[in-house]
């Protein structure tokens, strides 16, 4: 009877140890999954921040390009206006010179 009792207790002890190791394995597995999930989330957030930064940089470049285009257009318009005024001044000077020669 004693041997039977010891054998029964041994079986219960082994079953308890295997249950503990299953729990431990589950905890390790859950911890690993949590770490993997955290890494995945952090990588996703970092990627989003990089994308947002690139979007902001692209928008700033677009605004800068628009300003440069507008400045170039204004400079071209100013040059045309100055050219017209210079032609007019030269034409007026030639007319005056012609009148002076005629008189």
Image: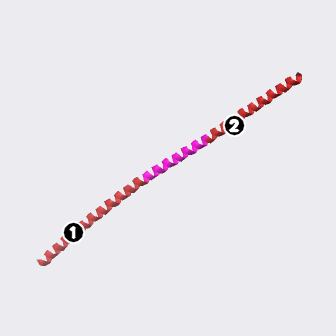
**Where does the image place residue 100, in percent across and percent down from the top left?**
14, 75
Residue underneath mark 1: 89
Q: Is the magenta stretch mostly helix, strand or loop?
A: helix
Colouring scheme applied when the structure was drawn: secondary structure
Residue at the spot x=43%, y=54% of the render?
Answer: 61
Q: Residue furthest left?
A: 103
**Where does the image place residue 81, in percent across and percent down from the top left?**
26, 63
Whether residue 84 is in magenta: the answer is no
Whether residue 45 is in magenta: the answer is yes
Looking at the picture, does residue 101 appear above or below residue 69? below
Q: Residue 36 appears in which quarter of the rendering?
A: top right
- Determine crowd level at label 2: few under 14, some 14-19, many 20+ residues with C-alpha closer than 10 A: few
Q: Which of 57 and 34 is in front in this view?
A: 34
Residue at the spot x=37%, y=55% of the render?
Answer: 67
Q: Which of 39 and 17 is in front in this view?
A: 17
* Callout 1 secondary element: helix
Residue 23 horizontal side relative to residue 7, left or right:
left
* Callout 2 secondary element: helix
**Where does the image place residue 38, in percent across and percent down from the top left?**
60, 40
Q: Residue furthest right?
A: 2
Q: Between label 2 and label 1, give the one nearer the viewer.
A: 2
Residue at the spot x=45%, y=52% of the render?
Answer: 58
Residue range (magenta): 37-60
Numbered label tally: 2
**Where does the image place residue 80, in percent across and percent down from the top left?**
28, 65
Residue at the spot x=29%, y=62% of the render?
Answer: 78
Residue underneath mark 2: 28
Q: Earlier in the sequence, mark 2 or mark 1?
A: 2
């Amino acid at each position: 009877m004693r041997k039977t009792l010891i054998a029964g207790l041994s079986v219960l002890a082994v079953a308890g140890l295997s249950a503990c190791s299953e729990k431990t394995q589950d905890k390790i597995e859950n911890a690993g999954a949590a770490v993997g999930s955290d890494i995945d989330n952090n990588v996703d957030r970092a990627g989003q921040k990089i994308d947002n930064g690139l979007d902001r940089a692209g928008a700033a470049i677009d605004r800068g390009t628009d300003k440069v285009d507008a400045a170039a257009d204004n400079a071209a318009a100013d040059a045309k206006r100055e050219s017209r005024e210079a032609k007019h001044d030269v034409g007026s000077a030639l007319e005056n010179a012609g009148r002076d020669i005629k008189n």
